Amino acid sequence: MTQTVQAIGEQELLKRLQAFCPAEVVGDDAAVLSVEVGKSLVVTSDVLVEGVHFSDQTTPPQAVGWRSAAANLSDLAAMGASPLGITVALGLPGELLVDWVEELYRGITGCLQKYETVIVGGDICRSPIITVAITALGQVEPANVIRRSTAQIGDAILVTGFHGSSRAGLELLLNPESAKELSAADRASLIQAHQHPNPRLDVLPFIPLAKRVEDNPSSLPVSGMDSSDGLADAIVQICRASQVGARVDRAAIPIHPALRRWVSPEKAMNWALYGGEDFELVLCLPSASAQMLVEKIEGAAIVGAITSDADIRVVDPTGEMPDEVLSLEQGFQHFGRD
């Protein structure tokens, strides 16, 4: 028989959810975790709200869970940190089916298992709408912390994969008949990018190797962040924090071939710059180090360079398209004007 959260009550729901967690970690008022000697603790939190970040039309509960975990692991990757564990706090309507909650947790743990990470605690409470609040804990050697504020003039700007794919996947879910020309495999690939993004923790082992290309790798800062709010947002945020400018080559931005076949070049570029939720890394580091990463990371590309200019522009070397000044205003802002 299908049961609701209200029907089984808080304690029974907690009992069921604790089955997704290591028994030796949960059960007390808080979790106790160890950080390796010589490493710093990294903490990040993210909230997903029904109707803002997900809906039944585009995101089944398993995908809500995956995406919520991926968003937080991506923030750790953007800091250069490897994950230690996450906590999950839920706001749930009483009439919500227990099956929905368990599917949510299957999505969370499915994502975490790829990175040998676990749920170490959390909370539940009654709420008129579904809210998923996750805190992720990670660790990093201080010399390997990635910050937004350390980009240097002359640095290459590197991205780790396709941009615009998540936005395209969302469009396919909202308007299934809008891309009849795409193959089933292409549609599945774009929808996968939206519902099951992969945080780029796989990139982190290569960064110390790239730093060794330089004469003094211990003093080489790698600047960067993830592109969860869009490629344009990431580049602008880095430049603002580092007080530099940038030039980005329009033709160098990696865009999924299926997206290029489906929509106009202008729309594909707009989704790549402002669509968001691709969860790739945007890194700024010397050209030789960046080139080494391109050789090691499939799909990575150097898309531009940090400059001393006051603005941040996407340019077309062929001259066919006018320059575009990047801004934060075109991307998603929680309290922006409609």
Image (spheres, rainbow, N blue to C red):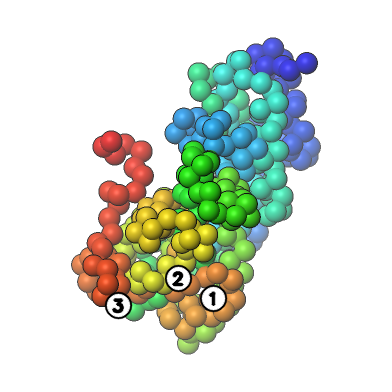
Q: Is residue 104 above or below residue 302?
A: above
Q: Residue furthest front?
A: 181
Callout 3–callout 1 Cβ contact below 8 Å? no
Q: Position of residue 168 (x, y in %)?
A: 48, 50
- Residue occupying image coordinates x 69% and y 43%: 109
Callout 2–callout 1 Cβ contact below 8 Å? yes
Q: Is residue 5 left or right of residue 333?
A: right
For mark 1, what is the residue?
293
Q: Nearer the viewer, mark 3 or mark 1?
A: 3
Q: Position of residue 302 (x, y in %)?
A: 44, 74
Q: Is residue 51 left or right of residue 102?
A: left
Q: Nearer the viewer, residue 172 or 221?
A: 172
Q: Amino acid at mark 3?
A: Thr
Q: Which mark is residue 318?
A: 3
Q: In 3D space, how far apart are the residues under numbered discs 3 and 2 (Cα atoms)? A: 21 Å
Q: Nearer the viewer, residue 256 or 127?
A: 256
Q: In 3D space, how far apart are the residues under numbered discs 3 and 1 (Cα atoms)? A: 27 Å
Q: Earlier in the sequence, mark 3 or mark 1?
A: 1
Q: Amino acid at mark 1?
A: Leu
Please identify the quarter of the rendering in which residue 91 is found. top right
- Residue occupying image coordinates x 70% and y 26%: 99
For the N terminus, the quadrant is: top right
- Residue occupying image coordinates x 52% and y 84%: 213
Q: Secondary structure at mark 2?
A: strand
Q: Amino acid at mark 2?
A: Leu
For mark 2, what is the residue?
158
- Residue occupying image coordinates x 45% and y 70%: 158
Please identify the quarter of the rendering in which residue 93 is found. top right
